[in-house]
Image (cartoon, rainbow, N blue to C red):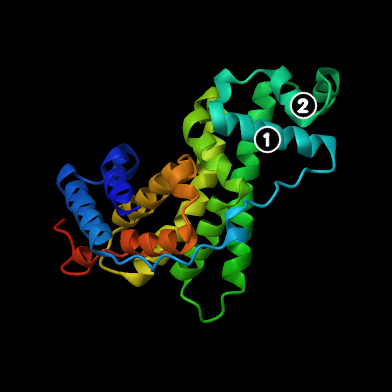
Amino acid sequence: MLGAAALSVYSNTSGMRGSLSPARLMEVQRAVADSILACRLPGSPEPDPDAERAPAHRRPASRRERILDAATQLFSERGFTDVRIDEIARTADVSIATLYQEVSGKSDLLRAVLWRGVQGILYVTAHALSRAGSDDPLDVLIRVFVEYALDVHGRIMPVFTSDLMYLPDTEQTQLRNAQMDYRAEWIDAIRSRNPLLTAADANALAQALFGYTCEIIESPQLRSRPGVTAELETIARAILNPAALRGAPPES
């Protein structure tokens, strides 16, 4: 977990860069990598035979929901371009004619899946923050995000990263703007914890967490680890509040 997290800091360089200068980007990446490698993960829980049996995925009752669920599963496993419409229909247990009564085609399904992912995380986050009381907003964001990412809807995150390009430019822009609304909550919470950070610094830290989490979602070995939820929460805190960035503010 720690090795994969440290490596992901550099494999996600393009996502972290934003408006940071090359020198500041290197400084932030080094601080995050050092913080990851220095953090202590929770002790491995005792094996639980019941926990090792993954709960059966609930089959949606309505046919439209079954179609969206099937599309999400197949897009996340193989990517948008490699999935055929008849495979989605078969996985959803509907005919192709029935599928076309609900959606106009594969692009329509991709659009619906991505909007569901963005709007879903925005809603559950806003709900959790509104009920947070005295809890630190960053802790709330981490808890909600990790639960969402490791649950069934987390499958949408890698689809967003890999397949957004297959939608028209205007729709890509709308989805990215909605994603920026979500990221703004992270930037604000990170800077509340550490006021010395700029918005660009905080954006880079949030992007580092998002990139690593996508790698966990796509790795059956990491995702199935006992105690992965507690481990990811611990690593998230290390990524978002590295000790080396708590000192003097960066030079302008």
Name which of mark 1 and mark 2 comes first in the sequence.
2
Q: How crowded is mark 2: few (under 14 residues within 10 Å), some or many (20 or more)?
A: some
Q: How crowded is mark 1: few (under 14 residues within 10 Å), some or many (20 or more)?
A: some
Amino acid carrying label 1: it is Ala
For numbered disc 1, what is the local secondary structure?
helix
Mark carried by residue 103: 2
Q: Image point 31% across, 37% down: which residue?
A: 14
Identify the image quadrant of the C terminus: bottom left
Question: Residue 215: which quarter of the image?
Answer: top left
Q: Image point 60% across, 67% down: which residue?
A: 128
Amino acid carrying label 2: it is Val
Q: How many marks?
A: 2
Q: Name the residue under label 1.
A: 112
Q: Image point 50% across, 58% down: which residue?
A: 146
Could you tell me if residue 39 is visible in this image?
yes
Query: Position of 117 compared to 27: left or right?
Result: right
- The percent position of residue 63, horizontal first and vertical second, equals 83, 35
Q: Do the residues labelled 1 and 2 touch (CB within 8 Å)?
A: yes
